[in-house]
Amino acid sequence: MPEPLTLAPEEQEWLDLARGWIKGHFANNPDEAYDTIEGKLAVIRANLAQGWVGPEDTWKLQSLGIAMGDALAQDLMLDWVTVDDEYGRQPALNWPGTSILCFPVTMISQRVEEGERIDIDMMYEQTREQLNEIAFGGDAE
């Protein structure tokens, strides 16, 4: 299992650029709207439902994944970290004090690129439940 690393400045900047694009969807008080878990999920839901992003929009789809990650991090008190593994360096969520990792950045993009329809609320709940199960099921290191 790769050791979670602190985000490098350019990785933090990439996450912040993505958040800036996401917040640009809110007409009023973008920071405030993005502050809530529901605000984060609503913007993802709207992008997918309205067809504003397609399979070719990898960066935008990954930005939606970052918003999903931000919602999970806020909900479960997870930390953004970097993982350097056989797939290269990539941002991930880490359950502090454990080896539990979640990779939300590609969670949406992979499915959209494969032509799958996504129920964002179901995906969010399932991911949340899986992380809680791993954390509290006695299998986590």
Image (cartoon, helix red, strand yellow):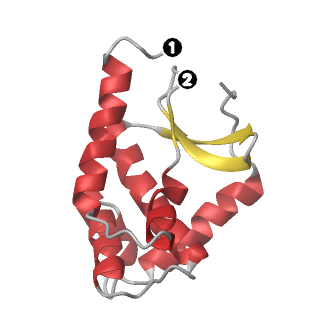
Relative to 139, does residue 45 appear above or below in the rendering? Answer: below
Element under disc 1: loop
Any mark on residue 141, and which? Answer: 1
Residue nearest the viewer, comparing 33 with 49: 49
Relative to 4, does residue 12 appear above or below in the rendering? Answer: below
Any mark on residue 2, and which? Answer: none
From the top left corner, tell me how far across and down residue 47 is, in percent: 36, 80
Relative to 70, does residue 23 appear above or below in the rendering? Answer: below
Question: Crowdedness of circle 2 by 10 Å Cα count: few (<14), some, many (20+)?
Answer: some
From the top left corner, tell me how far across and down residue 107 is, in percent: 47, 56
Marks 1 and 2: CB-CB under 8 Å? yes
Relative to 70, does residue 49 appear above or below in the rendering? Answer: below
Identify the residue at horizontal 50%, vertical 66% (top origin): 109
Question: Crowdedness of circle 1 by 10 Å Cα count: few (<14), some, many (20+)?
Answer: few
From the top left corner, tell me how far across and down residue 36 is, in percent: 28, 60
- Kindly identify the amino acid type of the residue bearing the numbered disc 2: Ser
From the top left corner, tell me how far across and down residue 8 is, in percent: 75, 49
Q: Is residue 20 left or right of residue 13?
A: left
Residue nearest the viewer, comparing 103 with 7: 103
Q: Is residue 100 left or right of residue 49?
A: right
Identify the residue at horizontal 51%, vertical 79% (top origin): 55
Identify the residue at horizontal 65%, vertical 24% (top origin): 1
Quadrant in the picture for residue 68? bottom left
Residues at marks 1 and 2, CA–CA distance in whole angstroms: 6 Å
Residue nearest the viewer, comparing 94 with 133: 133
**Which numbered disc flags the more N-terminal residue, 1 or 2?**
2
Q: Is residue 2 left or right of residue 31?
A: right
Report the residue marked by disc 2: 99
Element under disc 2: loop
- Kindly identify the amino acid type of the residue bearing the numbered disc 1: Glu
